[in-house]
Amino acid sequence: MKTRYLLALCFLPSFATAAVANDGGDARRFTADRVFDLEYADDPQISPDGSTIIYARKSMDKFTDKVVSDLWTIDTRSGSHRPLVSGEGSSSSVRWSPDGSRLVYLTTTDGKPDLRLRYQDSGNSFSLAQLEEGPGAPVWSPDGKTIAFSMLVPDERASFAKPPKSPEGAEWAKPVRIVDDLVFRFDGAGYLPKGKTQIFILSAEGGTPRQVTHGKNGFDSPQWLTNGSLLVTGNDGEDADLDPIESEIYRVDLESETVTPLTQRDGPDFSPKVAPNQSRIAYLGYDDQLKSYQETDVYVMAPDGSGVTNLTAGFDRSIDAIAWRADGRALIGQTEVDGILTLVSIDLAGNVRNLVDDIGGTSLGRPYAAGSFSVASKADGSTPVIAYTKGSTNRPAEVAFTRGNGNGRQLTRLNEDALAHLDLARIEEIKVTSAHDGREIEAWIALPPGFRADGSFPMILEIHGGPNTMYGPYFAAEIQRYAAEGYVTVYANPRGSTGYGEEFAQLIDLDYPGHDYDDLMSVVDAVLAKNYVSRDRLFVTGGSGGGVLTAWAVGKTDRFAAAATVKPVINWTSMALAGDIARFVSRHWFRAQPWEQPQEYWRRSPLSIVNNVTTPTMVMVGEADWRTPAWEAEQFYTALKVQNVDTVLVRVPGASHLIARRPSQLIAKVDNIMGWFAKYDPVKKPSDEKSRQGQEK
């Protein structure tokens, strides 16, 4: 057994070799090693007066194999671009003081979490406090004298026995771990420490943090209401773990530490933002209908929680983030609209209009719609002054700046040195009619350098996860790697995707996987009809929700020469009982427990149709994945193996559900997938295998 396990690990280098054997040949290709050359901008924070932007400049460290984050500053008038904080450990979550004279940010010092304050005039900085736990993003009080943040407050674990004292120098086994929480481990964090997140305040001159909340379930995401009160988010009800999306907004009086709920409905209320004159609170939320997906609306209320108004009831898109315009008469919101991440203006009468439609670019691996923005809080007039991450098809995120009159001026060129001289994929948009019910499905085709429409090229169908997420026309290192090796790659937003209205996203409610498969096959048919690719050279892959649909597809069709299902859910019963979002799965995706509706759980599990699979299928998963744990992939691998279907199990050591978080993991993921596909590509098969197959015929 141990030998077979080690062989599975060894597939990473062996398949990668098959895929990239010619990497040294072409200086104009986006080869695997060029992943380490990429940089991108994130979290641009504009100063209150709009004169300066500070952002996180993220790059790939070849020696630590990690994404590192430095803080850089840009003058919005001159475009001057300079480092601010670098080389001291990754820094993030920078926030301006209300008067623009100071900054607070998170970093690490000597390997420990550090909350630091920096004076803009002198450049001097200091550590605000000695922190034993990592703090959440800091926020300034209106008068600039105090900083609030969240932090874990540890608690003692349950214990039923006191172990005897071990002899000096003895090496006993680790003590038992007793679990009594419903959620005891989480993807990216592993086994969770015992405790709850609470809110702290701290003088801007440094000192000892003061804990101001003590709720049994914890609180998070502080925002200042006044200098003497905070808004926080949490669920202080009984059995909070059983309702994983429920949250309310609470007011915390700092003198008495009294906690008062301002929202009191069944459904999530979160992300409060206080108007510049403190007369209103805007926030996000919706009424919980137990659906697998619901759109998030923007609400406003008075500081005491009265007068609640839904500003986006007539806007059929979900709002993901908000910020007040400086004059307090409108909000800026980030939303997905038909494959495009967009900034909109939302006035207090509920009128919504588009401002910017080129935000994005922070999802480096796959072409998800992801980006961020900030608004100058003290700019004059009704025109918003906005900094944001600019996305495009051929570059990762850059910093852009606009005064609310359309797409902004790009202020950075972070990847010209790495990408300008390369031949990258050209992205073509197509709209396809679903064979199931005639609905329009949006998709994009990444055409490799040297492409010609002669029906000879191999094609990869790359399926997004979620399943309630959205792909768009954005740079993605994985897609570019496929193109560099000659693949036409198509990616789509089938039913269930966000950005096309709530009804479209809810088409897979209680029916996932389902007719989203038909949408994807219609996209494949459309690409074939264009004579772009060979019918004999079709491949399919996807991760998470895309891994589910990949496993489902090979149980439904044999049209693909090979497949690679990455971090899939294979058995919904085990997912609903052992994944880190198990309660969400049973409550919202099935609305029943596995023992209550076992046939429904089985009907929607790819394992239920694994007997149909003949397609050679690679199964890949991170060994530290607690979202779709490794045993999901292992079930599919074993089921294929006992049926003599060609398969391999690729386990990525140390990888969470974000299986390509580290640069070398992204390379290993993509190149092993291409190596597997090459093995079953009738054009790329090794000559000895072609000869053997010819003799067998």
Image (tube, grey):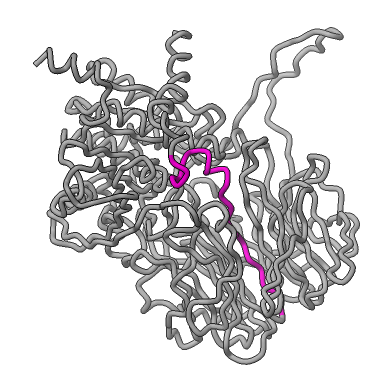
Quarter location, residue 398: bottom right
Return the residue nearer the eye: 252 or 607.
607
Q: Residue furthest left?
A: 697
Question: Which quadrant is the C terminus positioned in?
Answer: top left
Return the residue nearer the eye: 192 or 564.
564
Which residue is pictured at 51% across the width and 79% down the height?
308
Residue 219 belongs to magenta span: no
Residue 31 belongs to magenta span: yes
Question: Which quadrant is the N terminus positioned in?
Answer: top left
Which residue is pictured at 21% across the width and 37% down the height?
537
Return the residue nearer the eye: 526 or 277.
526
Q: Is residue 461 left or right of residue 11?
A: left
Quarter location, residue 634: top left
Q: Is residue 551 visible?
A: yes
Which residue is pictured at 32% across the width and 42% down the height?
486
Which residue is pictured at 65% across the width and 78% down the height?
376
Q: Is residue 14 left or right of residue 109?
A: left
Q: Position of residue 62 (x, y in %)?
A: 63, 38
Please give the count of numbered marks on the rendered protein. 0
- The magenta stretch spans which residues? 26-48
Q: Position of residue 207 (x, y in %)?
A: 91, 57
Q: Is residue 262 visible?
A: no
Q: Is residue 608 above or below residue 87?
A: above
Q: Position of residue 374 (x, y in %)?
A: 61, 71
Q: Is residue 533 left or right of residue 631?
A: left
Quarter location, residue 693: top left
Q: Is residue 369 above or below residue 33?
A: below
Q: Is residue 424 above or below residue 172?
A: below
Q: Position of residue 623 (x, y in %)?
A: 51, 28
Q: Is residue 245 above or below residue 619?
A: below
